[in-house]
Image: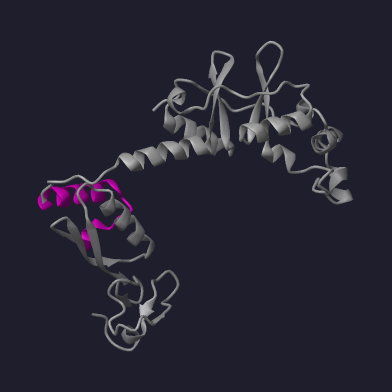
Amino acid sequence: MRARQIMSAPVVSACPKTTLRRAIDLMLEAGISGLPVIDAQGLLVGIVTEGDLLRRTELGTEGRAPRWIQYLRSPGKLAEEYAHSHGRLVEEVMSSPVTTVTEDAPLHAIVEAMTRARIKRVPVLRGSAVVGMISRADIVRVLGAALAADQPVGNRSDADIRHDILAEFDRAICIPKATIEVTVDGGTAELHGWITDERERSAVHAAVEGVPGITALRDHLAWVEPITGLVLPSPDDGDSDGTGAAEPGPPGAPPVAKSQIAGTPS
């Protein structure tokens, strides 16, 4: 999956001398949260986003640092902040420089660039020209399509399903595969054994549920506190008296049914 397959196009943009009011109208009309800023030569010089418009004097939300902190800041920094909160032109409020990707960039590189820069959208370039925009919504859309295409696979043997589960356990180093026994019957996976950190349960479930052919999951993994040896049943097994009543366990442990607190977990 490449940037050109994910990006939204054509691009709605602004120029440096566009008024802030007009830029806001463009974003609202197009239903977008950011505009690339392109100069008269067609070069990308900045980007203006909803985040750039949060600290505004019209809203009473401009930054008000204590006077003594302002004295510690350079005059240039103070001037930049003032222009950002009071400016009426796009060039006065836009963010620059801009993180970009090429149209051939793979999806993993796009996500890494957005995560590293802590941004929600990235312009896509062909040479120096902006040809598209990729936002978090575009990536979520790709994920939705991938999940929709992940249909249950029929006619898989239980042995093949179990083999794939164990193979995924091998790939995921966070899963304590040595303490977990897996059986599969009619597409239903049953887990027996124990874990020493309740967060491991979610990882185990994710690994099992992602295997084609799985129709159900029954979790019988106990939680074992590694220092004291305290054993608590799985959430599925804990309510042995059928009342649904539960008490919280130690920090990091799952809730435990009241009937299990005084007795020995099954």
Foreground of the two, 26 or 249: 26
Main secondary structure of the magenta stretch:
helix
Q: Position of residue 75 (x, y in %)?
A: 87, 35
In the displayed structure, does residue 146 sit left or right of residue 76? Answer: left
In the rendered image, the quadrant that contains the C terminus is bottom left
Span highlighted in magenta in the image:
158-181
In the displayed structure, does residue 239 sit left or right of residue 101? Answer: left
Foreground of the two, 235 or 31: 31
Q: Position of residue 102 (x, y in %)?
A: 50, 21
Number of marks drawn: 0
**Name of the residue lying farthest toward the front:** 29
Q: Is residue 13 magenta?
A: no
In the displayed structure, does residue 198 sit left or right of residue 29? Answer: left
Q: Is residue 178 magenta?
A: yes
Q: Position of residue 62 (x, y in %)?
A: 81, 45
Give the vertical position of 6 relative to 156 (above or below). above
In the displayed structure, does residue 164 sit left or right of residue 201? Answer: left
In the rendered image, the quadrant that contains the N terminus is top left
Q: Position of residue 79 (x, y in %)?
A: 85, 34
Q: Indicate the quadrant where residue 2 lies.
A: top left
